[in-house]
Amino acid sequence: MRVLCCEDDFETWRGQARGLLAEGLPPHAVVWEDENRPQLFAAEEPAPYHGSGAVTRVPGELIEQLRSAAQYRMPGRWNLLYRILWRVTRGEREAMLAGDCDGSELHRRIKSVSREAHHLHAFVRFQPVTNAADLDYVAWYEPAHDILAGASLHFAERLGRQRWLIATPRDAVWYDGVHLEYRRPCPAAWQARAQASSGGEDRLWETYYASIFNPARLNRQAMQGHMPLRFWKGLTEGKLIPVLLSQARAGSQKDGQAQGVKGKRGKIIRPARES
Amino acid sequence: MELIDKLTILADAAKYDASCASSGAPKRSSRGKDGIGATNGMGICHSYTPDGRCVSLLKILLTNFCLYDCQYCVNRRSSDVPRARFSPEEVIKLTLDFYQRNYVSGLFLSSGIIQSPDYTMEQLIRVAKVLREEHQFRGYIHLKTIPEADPALIEEAGRYADRLSVNIELPSPASLIQLAPEKRLASITGAMGTIDSASNESRADKRAPRFAPGGQSTQMIVGADASDDSRILHTAEALYGDYRLRRVYYSAFSPIPNSPASVPFQAPPLLREHRLYQADFLLRSYGFKANELLGATGNLPLDIDPKLAWALGNRAEFPVDLNRAEPAMIARVPGIGIRTAQRIVSLRRLKRIRFEDLLRMRCVIDKARPFVVTSDYRPRQDTLESTHLRSQLSDQPAQMALWA
């Protein structure tokens, strides 16, 4: 059994996999470990394989699919990728398709990763930075997969020349208005700046959120399906959700009016007299 | 009045409009440019409220003062609700601030009718124009169009907005006369026609300025009048055909404060709304016709979805052999969506489709089972009567909520 470690880096893994293919090493004879540490069976000398040594051509589409699935965080994520690569280079192209048993797992991971990138675009909350010359906005975010490097340029498209920082427990990106700098691990100073900003209040946004909600249509299941619990703590409006849910349950379901509007004085408009 | 009080009132006043989509805009980016804002055609839901609705845009009214007296509307002139009015600058500031903090992807601005339809429309346009021209805002803008406004104003609105919408409000002309005395079907469809032809002209000439590239949408209120689902779906189908609407939104009539006696004061018919959306999706994406889903009168069943209902009513078309059938027919099988149908077609170029492939592609297998044939499977239920099949496949009744 060959034991490898690519430190969860796709290009490192790709280089290793290319070498193994040239060697002709089948997927059952290799295992990628998540960290460099001694393995129980690592000492066993693998049986020699005699590959062609030729560089194998792989469809570009497959590389992109593997690159994307590689961002899916789970122990042993690299082994499936090599098995698919191996099968495709041996002529089993269906290994890439969702109908295949490996392919379906590949596509499940790709889908989760792209959903998680979409979650980043949706649920990052930027706080304006008022006391620093080098930054306009900062955010702390905890993604479930390794999507930050690939998905964060989206914010440069949104925010133009503004400068921003997104830090996560694993890595970080800093955009200085022109270039994007990616760091892994996240520098401690960046992490401190981002974390100091999180959990802030924003009365205007909280007011909007509470007012645009229609308690007569309460549907907790639908909300939580789209915005699972794990995101709530990162959202300014997260702390309002339980309050709004219980208010709606306790009676404001009978019409849709927001609590904030109920106490205010109303005004009926009399049409101007025809002249 | 403080900004925060205005926001409380004018967001509350805007929530009965179901649409909040930020999709359909062309790709725009502010990277390396002055100004802010991007669109990519997809749209983003930045949050969800506890009613399960997506928060994609800052959806507010410019004002909820209104001269009209539409019975179903919380802002009608005879309604005793608090009133407020934003200045255009306040809306602009809120939009830019919310956008930069990544709360929203743009603005959906509507308004009560004040002074005159033209005046109201001019106010809406002014907000969009300043956002685009002075702040170089490239995010999404959806403007509500006032049907009676001058066509020249509607054309101007389309130069700044990604999407325009005119609400059809009710499924039948008679209901409109009864419940919305100041509105006229002719001016509503007239405005839709103005938008459609302006958008046609802009597409025909590449050098012409863009006109509402996200197209137009509308909203129909469900359950405020007695119209049945057949009337609603046929109206929607006609609108899709005549004015090439991107979307028809169905809004279950939700009880309003100070409710007049002319409209129901009941919990909104949410399941009915859900079935209408499903049926609408079948019209837009699956090539179904309203006539196939419903006769000249009648409602969609609530216990099963409209595609399953169609399949149960057309058993002669089934079972479908997934190794031979046309892709469009595969997509008509209950439990198999368009994407899965495409996947089946690409897989069958390589191998024969087996039943286990359907499991792997995550079809809704219980729904699909009676209607498909694969190389290793034929449905035993094929001869089972539709009524029995229906009782097996219908949604189980759910426990009612205490306050519902």
Image (spheres, coloured by chain):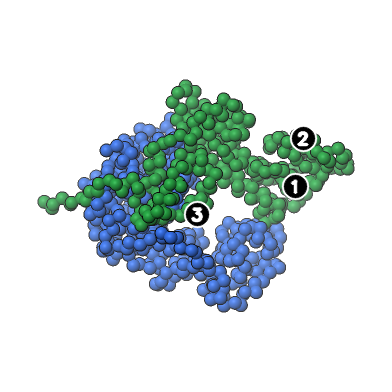
Chain colours: A green, B blue
User: Regarding mark 2 in the picture, which secondary structure is present there?
Assistant: loop
What is the residue that sits farthest to the left in this orientation?
Answer: A275
State the image coordinates of residue A19 (x, y, percent, origin top left). 78, 38
Local crowd size for mark 1, using a 10 Å CA cut-off: few (<14), some (14–19), many (≥20) = some
Quick one: B83 or B123, which is closer to the camera? B83
Indicate which disc, 3 or 1, sits on the residue closer to the N terminus: 1
Residue of label 2: A37
Looking at the rendered image, the quarter that the C terminus of chain B falls into is bottom left
Q: Is residue B81 left or right of residue A95?
A: left
Q: Spatial distance from mark 3 to mark 1, Cα to Cα?
A: 38 Å
Dot 1 corresponds to which residue? A83
Q: Residue at x 59, y 62 (%)?
A: B364
What residue do we see at 46% from left, 42% from top? A239
Tell me which numbered mark, 2 or 3, is placed earlier along the sequence. 2
Residue B300 placement (x, y as % from top left): 45, 68
Q: Residue at x 35, y 67 (%)?
A: B227
- Amino acid carrying mark 3 in the image: Gln
Measure the alpha-carbon separation of dots 2 and 3.
43 Å
For label 3, the crowd category at 10 Å Cα-Cα, with few meaning under 14, some 14 to 19 and many 20 or more, is: few
Q: Circle 3 is placed at which residue position?
A: A221
Measuring from the top left, give residue B206's x and y in whole percent. 43, 44
Badge 3 sits on which subunit? A
- The earlier-in-sequence mark between 2 and 1 is 2
Kindly identify the amino acid type of the residue bearing the numbered disc 2. Answer: Arg
**Within 10 Å of the Cα at label 2, are there few (<14), some (14-19), or many (20+) other Cα atoms?**
few
Same chain, labels 2 and 1: yes
Identify which residue, A251 or B382, lies in the foreground. Answer: A251
Q: Quadrant of the N terminus of chain B?
A: top left
